[in-house]
Image (tube, helix red, strand yellow):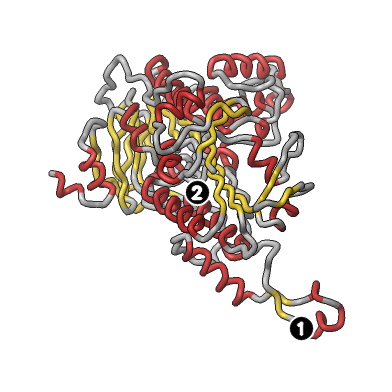
């Protein structure tokens, strides 16, 4: 069974939220859960859209969490099983087997913190695959952070699990994937079922129309002016040490007023460029911004100079989930530029101007169509698409000259994707903000960008116009761009 819209039903089934009337039956048995633990005990697993990993733990520890193998010892023989020793060898062996099952070749004993989001997604899946009692596995936007090749690998994993008798509930906004694997489709809009189209006869366009209530077009608006040839950002021999996305030697010139796309396969360094320049990971090289040498490894300096960043990890880096919409929108400008403070001759005595922050949040909510109950609502209670709009609003509040955006449409629905891309192109067109957009969605880069740089093994393999042949992009991603010449 496949649903094309994310939301409460999967969480309700898992016992995470309970404010719903329901009738749940699994393999002929009526079920009622009071907690996620009860759902897991019954054989239900879930790969969440927002990662449920412990960053400070090792990969194997995350996979075996709460199911750790143990060995008896003298103390446990007297005082009970709770004092048994951890069987590290078996834990590592089990984790290695689960990682191999999902095709992830990383060391099972490294820490999760700092790994690429694509790796984290496969670790989440490996954790569920490792469970012996698994009967039903819920995937909530599992391919949102994956490249096309990794997404296809995941679909093969789903097919394999289904062939072994596991039920799969696949919640996604990537509609071509729905048609590729689903036996049945259920489309939700605003929490209600609006259609159950036959996967053998329906189309992506029809499913998208059911989801948003109107015909949907993913392509964003193109610009009405040409960018200059004047350089906005010059990057020379950049190296960066983001785990799993290491940059080896990047040289790249970003033109003022353009939208430059950065694409490539997962693990080849495309995400590392923005993270390195913005100071989130150690970086070396020469960067010139605004005709002045730009200091690396200085996040505050980057913001003060007029750069901003919308991270691919919106919950881990881009947002404070427990805080309000208005604070999330204002925070970077407050910290880096001293905005939203009452003036005072003594800087240490400046206090927060709640009224100004509230009014600005209302402006951003209206401008970006952020669906929220108001500026005081906690960000964690918003949908993924609206959380992404808050991230964009936070960056816009800085009034940047150049904006890095990584994976702008990850895990959001068709309508929200369309709106986010429109917001970005409008920011470029109307405010002349130079954009550097990194994405695993090559079609989206080709829809909105002036040029697309393809990164392979930590270096720029090719820079292509958006209307270049598909084969040219494919060869560049494989490190074979010379063959296209």
Badge 1 marks a residue whose secondary structure is loop
Find disc 2 in the rendering and name its residue. 117
- Residue 218 seen in the figure: yes
Q: Residues within 10 Å of mark 1 (few under 14, many from 20)?
A: few
Residue name at image x 57 percent, y 30 percent: 188
Q: Residues within 10 Å of mark 2 (few under 14, many from 20)?
A: many
Q: Are marks 2 and 1 in contact (CB under 8 Å)?
A: no
- How many numbered discs sit on the rendered protein? 2
On the rendered image, what quadrant is the C terminus found in? top left
Observer-nearest of 265 and 172: 172
Q: State left or right for residue 481 relative to residue 274.
A: left
Q: State left or right for residue 402 relative to residue 384.
A: left
Where residue 322 sits, quadrant-wise, is: top right
**Coordinates of residue 443 in the picture (x, y in percent):** 34, 34
Find disc 1 in the rendering and name its residue. 73
On the rendered image, what quadrant is the N terminus found in? top right
Q: State left or right for residue 265 relative to residue 22.
A: left
Observer-nearest of 137 and 25: 25
**Coordinates of residue 281 in the picture (x, y in percent):** 49, 48
Residue name at image x 21 percent, y 34 percent: 468
Residue 150's place in the image compared with 382, above or below, is below
Q: Residue lying farthest front? A: 28
**Coordinates of residue 416 in the picture (x, y in percent):** 50, 26
- Residue 344 seen in the figure: no
């Amino acid at each position: 069974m496949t649903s094309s819209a994310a939301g409460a039903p999967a969480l309700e089934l898992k016992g995470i939220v309970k404010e719903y009337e329901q009738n749940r039956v699994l393999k002929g048995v009526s079920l009622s859960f009071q907690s996620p633990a009860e759902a897991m005990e019954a054989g239900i697993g879930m790969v969440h859209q927002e990662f449920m990993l412990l960053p400070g733990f090792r990969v194997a520890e995350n996979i075996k969490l709460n199911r750790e193998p143990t060995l008896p010892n003298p103390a446990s023989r007297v005082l009970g099983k709770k004092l048994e020793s951890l069987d590290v060898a078996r834990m590592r062996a089990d984790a290695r087997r689960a990682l191999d099952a999902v095709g992830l070749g990383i060391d099972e004993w490294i820490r999760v913190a700092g790994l690429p989001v694509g790796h984290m997604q496969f670790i989440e899946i490996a954790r569920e695959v490792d469970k012996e009692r698994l009967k039903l596995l819920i995937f909530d936007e599992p391919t949102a952070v994956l490249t096309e090749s990794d997404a296809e690998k995941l679909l093969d994993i789903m097919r394999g699990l289904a062939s072994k008798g596991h039920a799969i509930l696949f919640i996604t906004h990537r509609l071509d994937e729905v048609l590729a694997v689903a036996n049945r489709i259920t489309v939700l809009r605003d929490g209600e079922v609006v259609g159950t189209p036959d996967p053998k006869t329906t189309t992506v366009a029809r499913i998208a129309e059911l989801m948003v209530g109107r015909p949907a077009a993913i392509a964003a608006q193109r610009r009405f002016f040409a960018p200059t040839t004047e350089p906005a950002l010059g990057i020379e021999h950049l190296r960066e040490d983001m785990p799993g996305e290491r940059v080896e030697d990047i040289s790249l010139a970003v033109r003022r007023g353009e939208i430059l796309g950065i694409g490539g396969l997962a693990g080849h360094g495309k995400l590392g460029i923005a993270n390195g320049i913005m100071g989130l990971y150690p970086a070396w090289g020469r960067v010139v911004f605004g005709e002045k040498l730009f200091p690396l490894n200085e996040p505050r300096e980057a913001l003060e100079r007029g750069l901003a960043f919308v991270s691919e990890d919106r919950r881990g880096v881009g947002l404070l989930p427990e805080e309000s919409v208005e604070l999330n929108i204002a925070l970077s400008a407050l910290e880096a530029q001293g905005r939203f403070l009452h003036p005072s001759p003594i800087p240490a005595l400046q206090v927060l101007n709640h009224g100004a922050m509230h009014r600005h949040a209302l402006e951003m909510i209206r401008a970006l169509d952020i669906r929220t109950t108001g500026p005081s609502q906690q960000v964690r209670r918003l949908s993924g698409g609206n959380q992404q709009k808050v991230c964009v609003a936070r960056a816009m509040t800085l009034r940047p000259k150049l904006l890095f955006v990584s994976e702008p449409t990850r895990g959001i629905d068709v309508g929200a994707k369309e709106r986010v891309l429109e917001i970005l192109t409008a920011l470029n067109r109307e405010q002349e903000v130079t954009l550097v957009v990194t994405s695993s969605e090559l079609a989206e880069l080709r829809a909105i960008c002036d040029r697309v740089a393809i990164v392979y093994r930590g270096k720029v393999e090719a820079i292509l116009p958006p209307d270049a042949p598909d084969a040219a992009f494919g060869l560049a991603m494989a490190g074979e761009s010379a063959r296209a010449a």
